């Protein structure tokens, strides 16, 4: 037995290549790749950067996105206690929620003497 016994005929090679191309096309059509940029940062990193840039309100947005991902819900309660551990006081939270609401990014249900409930409004890509 020689190595030549294991060679494929040109027709067999062409058939295998066509089958592989068809399989790749089906695979690509079934699972389109996302084209949006994505970054993974810890909340601590974001908090430090927000404090360094004197913009704690940006942390509130990142925290909201994190909680919505964590709870698998577009609606979350935003307590003062949850944010104070990251150096975000209630006034920064109030200002951030007002600005995000004015920009049309969230809807805020304010309740007297209770934690506000925030709903994310999806923004098109």
Image (spheres, helix red, strand yellow):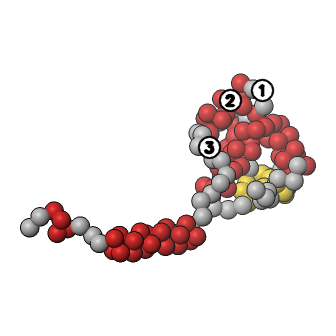
| Quadrant including the C terminus | bottom right
Element at badge 3?
Answer: loop
Disc 1 to disc 2: CB gap under 8 Å: no
Q: Mark 2 or mark 3: which is in front?
A: 3
Q: CA distance from mark 2 to mark 3?
A: 15 Å
Residue 92 position by quadrant:
top right
Q: Position of residue 21 (x, y in %)?
A: 48, 69
Element at badge 1?
Answer: loop
Q: To which residue does mark 3 refer?
A: 39
Disc 2 to disc 3: CB gap under 8 Å: no
Q: To which residue does mark 2 refer?
A: 49
Q: To which residue does mark 1 refer?
A: 54
Disc 1 to disc 3: CB gap under 8 Å: no
N-term mark: 1 or 2: 2
Q: Position of residue 14 (x, y in %)?
A: 39, 71
Label 2 Cα crowd, 10 Å radius (few <14 / some 14-19 / many 20+):
some
Q: CA distance from mark 1 to mark 2?
A: 8 Å
Q: Does the rendering let one see residue 119?
A: no
Q: Position of residue 41 (x, y in %)?
A: 60, 40
Label 3 Cα crowd, 10 Å radius (few <14 / some 14-19 / many 20+):
few
The residue lying toward the viewer, choosing from 55 and 30, is 30
Residue 40 position by quadrant:
top right
N-term mark: 2 or 3: 3
Q: State the count of labels.
A: 3
Judge from the rendering whether residue 12 lies leftward or rightward of residue 87; answer left or right. Answer: left
Please report the residue visible at 72 percent of the width from the left and 31 percent of the height from the top: 50
| Quadrant including the N terminus | bottom left
Q: CA distance from mark 1 to mark 3?
A: 22 Å
Please report the residue visible at 72 percent of the width from the left and 61 percent of the height from the top: 74
Please report the residue visible at 65 percent of the width from the left and 54 percent of the height from the top: 35
Label 1 Cα crowd, 10 Å radius (few <14 / some 14-19 / many 20+):
few
The residue lying toward the viewer, choosing from 37 and 2, is 2
């Amino acid at each position: 037995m020689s190595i030549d016994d294991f060679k494929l005929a040109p027709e067999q090679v062409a058939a295998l290549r066509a089958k592989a191309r068809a399989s790749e096309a089906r695979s690509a059509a079934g699972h389109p790749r996302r084209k949006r940029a994505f970054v993974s940062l810890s909340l601590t990193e974001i908090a430090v950067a927000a404090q360094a840039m004197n913009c704690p309100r940006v942390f509130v947005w990142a925290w909201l996105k994190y909680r919505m991902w964590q709870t698998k819900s577009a609606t979350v309660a935003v307590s003062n206690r949850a944010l104070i551990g990251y150096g975000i006081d209630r006034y920064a939270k109030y200002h951030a929620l007002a600005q995000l609401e004015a920009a049309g990014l969230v809807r805020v249900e304010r309740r007297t003497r209770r934690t506000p409930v925030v709903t994310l409004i999806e923004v098109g890509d």
